[in-house]
Amino acid sequence: MFDMFDKESGFVRNVVNEIVRECSFKRLQINKNFATFLTNLHLLDPTWDIQEDFLCSRGRVEDFVKYVMEELLTKQESPKIITLKIQFYFVCNQQYSPMIVQTNRDSFKKKIEVLYKDIIECRKLETIFGVELLYKKMAYYMTLVTGLGNPTEPRVFAEALAALKSILKEDYLMEFIKLSKTTKKDEFQHFNNIVAGIRLYNRHLKVGGAGIPNLPELLYKGTVTIKIGIEETLANIKHKSQILTFVIRKNYTIAKTTRGYNMEVKFVGTRQQTDDINYMKHLLVFFKQYELIVKDIMKNVEEIEEELEKFYSEMKELLTLAHSSIHKKVAIPAEIVYPIFKKLWSMWEKFQNKALLLKRIITMMTNLQTYAIQTGYQYLKIAPIKNYNEAESNNFCLRSKIRRSYITIIKYEEWNELENVELEYLGFCPWTLMQTDGALIPGDPSMGVAEFHNKYYAFTCPEAFQEFDKNPHLCINSVLELARKQPQFINLLHLTKNLEKVYHIKNLIEAKADLRAYKDIGTQTEDHIVKSNIDLKYHWNVWDLKRLALTTAALSHSRTKACQSNKTTSKTNIGNQTYSTEKQVWTQTRKNAGSNGPKPSIFMYGLRGRRTDEQFKIDLTLPYK
């Protein structure tokens, strides 16, 4: 619907074209806008070193395209790619939501454009039938474009035609068709708004309005139903997020080292177990993003509900004004009544626009649910958990061991009094993000909040704050480095601007060599720890041991048997003679024979020399002997 691709620079378009071309070779369908979205996120990582000069960066572009193709082919159903898909889907719908209504109306007008051109391009009406036909076309189009009923129904069409004829007399219709095309379009739109307002006013008086639904009441019920559905979805998402958070936290433990604290995997197992933990971390990222999107949709529904209440009160006041100005009056100047009708239609059009937005929201919720099913959460086997939603109780408060002037600790009571202040990383602990390579564990503001460079951070435990306090730049840069390698965190944690600021720095984290400590240690061994012993069965050759092992293994599958045959006193030779059973046999086929039937011969008598038509046939066929 909306082309994100066309708005990008030529450099990005070239990269996207390469990706789309490779996808077509691999028979992989990809949305060009999604490829653009994915490319922009990956190019925030300067390690790709792709410059504006496309030809000079050709080799690096090929590596980048190969990497993206591998991500799309091998991880198509992974939570990581699905998270990027829902981010792209929501960005498109949220960014272009003001255009959705207008686009919907324009597409509908395009379907009935032929009828509109037929009305506007009409220049001559020679007969009464032509005048009546133009009236019908105008009434039909007005009913369709306003959405006030089905014009194929006789009552709806009759009301629209009567309202049109009441404001557009035949004399003015003749003048209308002679106007210029631009003026005619403006006048026709003017008539359309007035006719729609008249029909809405008649519906209010219950003397008309056939086919017009009670849109305000339907929208009120619709918003209530949608809110209930969104709340249920949100509760389900939070339930799954809490379970995943609990499971991930139980798989990590904080270990104290000589340099401080580290988070380590508690159960070091097979590679499959490590992959399962990583899968759950990506799955948690998806559900956190899903939760944020649903909350944003809920906020939009609440805004629509407030606007609908405002529209309803304005509509009520407008109908009261129309009733006092029009009802039971014989003649009313057009200058007074026409603006009321136009305002009435304008207000009703706002209701229709909100109905389109609500319909779009329902579609979005359905599609997001489809994405959630694709993650495969329903196939996870997690043992029943008790009290997973209860926070770990602690009475710790954040304290800095080394007083630093650039870090301020805000107490929980003071934090609650602050307004319009948000935690960085949506309140997730930055140290845990760094240590676990992407586990979204929420911080606990009740222990206090750390302020660093006018930004606020919450932590899961005092140990996390102590490590952050030692080197906050390392922790923050580690999160940015994580977002470079895993782009699903960029939109989730709102890191786009931060990554753009540090784009010129390729290595945000400097790798430091481990310092080794050396000691002088002396050892002393005994002269003879083990008594001397000569083993006569010792084999120095490895092949002797292998041969013995093979023999022993073969004997383990063998067994001994003995048998005795009957005694024989004598032996004789016996000879056998065979003979041939072949003999000559002759066969004779039957002799050839044939038959010949009689040759038919018929004579037509009376074809010549007679004036009458009494001809007949004479059979001259000879019988067969």
Image: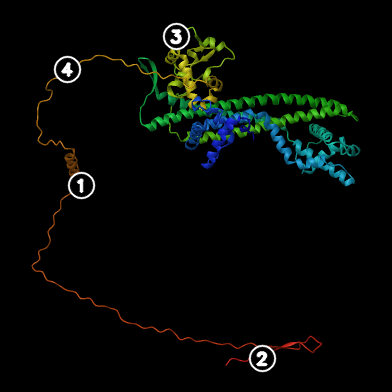
How far apart in space, not on screen, are marks 4 and 3 (Cα)?
48 Å
Q: Nearer the viewer, mark 4 or mark 3?
A: 4
Residue contact between numbered discs 4 and 1, judged by CB atoms under 8 Å: no
How far apart in space, not on screen, are marks 1 and 3 (Cα)?
72 Å
How far apart in space, not on screen, are marks 3 and 2 (Cα)?
136 Å
Residue 137: image quadrant is top right
Residue 299: image quadrant is top right
Residue contact between numbered discs 1 and 3, judged by CB atoms under 8 Å: no
The picture places residue 123, in percent across and down from the top left corner, at 86, 42
Amino acid type at image mark 4: Gln
Q: Dot 2, how many residues are within 10 Å of its Cα: few (below 14), some (14-19), or many (20+)? A: few
Q: Dot 3, how many residues are within 10 Å of its Cα: few (below 14), some (14-19), or many (20+)? A: some
On the image, numbered disc 4 is attached to which residue? 524
Amino acid type at image mark 1: His
602 and 458: which one is in front?
602
On the image, numbered disc 2 is attached to which residue? 620
Amino acid type at image mark 2: Leu
Q: Secondary structure at mark 2?
A: loop
